[in-house]
Amino acid sequence: MTAGRKWPPEWEDYEDPSSGVTVRRLTNYKGHSHHLYFTNPGWWDGGRRLLFGSDRQNRSNLFSIELEGGEITQLTDLERDAGFLQACVNPTRPEAYFWYDRAVVALGLHSLELRALWTLPDGFRSTMLNCTADGAFVCAGVVEDLSDRIHVPLRYIYAGFRETHEAHPLCRIMKIGTDGSGADTVWEEENWIGHVNTSPTQPHLLTFCHEGPWDIVDNRIWGLDVTTGRAWRIRPREGAESVGHEYWHADGLYVGYHGHRPDGAQAGRRFFGRVRYDNADRTEVDFPHQTGHIHSNDFSLIVGDGYAGSRAVRLWRWNGEDFDGPRALCEHRSSFHVQEVHVHPRFSPDGSYVIYTSDVTGYGNVYQVAVAEFESLPRLE
């Protein structure tokens, strides 16, 4: 395979059997394809193209699809696997970043040239990448490698999840210059850090999480000012409740999440929440049904993927007091067997459609579905 190779459109439109909406399968290859992690928008070229990772001809590479015509461009030609689920796009110029051979590399999306920005030190492993709103830095969490003590195949199953949390590995958050100027450690602690998410509008703000079972971590969601190094709890956990799957709203000021209260007067209640990064203006509302990952551009409409064994991409709509729904936007029927085929639905920047991944055909593929009129969609009981 060669970087720059053009692949003809692979897409296929079909009518969803549950909702009747038109679903477009964007990819169709006998190997897994997936969009970026749901906190990392993969759109570029003014939203006209979308990045995705794909396993083709026994290699994993990064690709781009033109959303109007369907033509696919291969962007890399790598000999070894790279972390495309953890990749991110520079919001100010056509450049993407991902892990390859223990280095954070920059890829020019037009030139297809690769630049190494920073190399992971020995004794650490990589986690999520995210670019600051001004495009000046890539932020990354790095975690002490405990593989000689704990078996942690987290890409496949959550074996070792609790053990890694309890081991309190040394973790750092790195701020890496996209101009190649080097990297600085902006946070370090002996707690398992994951999910470094930069605000889409505030260049100095990011969130990170303390990984581990949600009901036993000291606090899941944390904020960090990368200019001052100050960290603080966002939405402090209360009692034995679980809170997580945090993500930024499009305004870059509010953080969305969901949670579960296992005890007390509200035992068994699941809730959606949003809170400003400084813990002001917190809103939490109970919602029916279970969900895994959720996403929204604001608090008006939320998309979720259910959980392993569920079938539908689902929507909840805010009515000013609580959430209506869920309504089934379409069936995904994904297996959730590995991270690359988790559904991870997310709205497009303008909120007009949802992107998700499913292996319902036997292989992971990327799907696009327009957001239909809420009242026209079937209820999920």
Image (cartoon, rainbow, N blue to C red):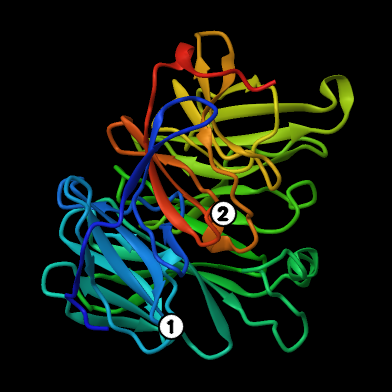
What residue would you read off at disc 2? 342
Q: Within 10 Å of the Cα at label 2, are there few (<14), some (14-19), or many (20+) other Cα atoms?
A: many
Image-based side of 239 in relation to 362, left or right: right
Nearest to the observer: residue 286 or residue 33? 33
Residue 352 image position (x, y, % from top left): 31, 30
Q: Amino acid at mark 2?
A: His
Q: Amino acid at mark 1?
A: Asn
Q: Quadrant of the C terminus?
A: top right
Is 24 rendered above or below residue 228? above
Q: Whole-percent x and y of residue 177?
A: 27, 71
Q: Quadrant of the N terminus?
A: bottom left
Q: Residue furthest right?
A: 264
Along the line of sight, which residue is nearer the eye, 196 or 154? Answer: 154
Closer to the camera, 31 or 305? 31
Question: In this picture, is 30 found above or below 371?
Answer: below
Q: Circle 2 — which element? A: loop
Could you give the CA–CA distance between mark 1 and mark 2, rounded to whole angstroms? 21 Å
**Nearest-to-viewer mark from 1 and 2:** 1
Q: Residue 58: which disc?
A: 1
Would you identify the image quadrant in which residue 182 lies? bottom left
Q: Residue 243 appears in which quarter of the rendering?
A: top right
Q: Is residue 97 left or right of residue 210?
A: left
Where disc 1 sits, the SS reads loop
Residue 252 numbered mark, or none:
none
Please state if 245 lies on the left or on the right of 131 as rendered.
right
- Provide residue 20's location: percent of width, then percent of height: 45, 25
Crowding at dot 1, Cα within 10 Å, few <14 / some 14-19 / many 20+, comes out as few
Label located before the other in sequence (1 or 2): 1
Q: Tell me which residue sits at (29%, 42%) in the image.
A: 201
Instruction: Give the image location of residue 67, x and y in percent.
Output: 22, 47
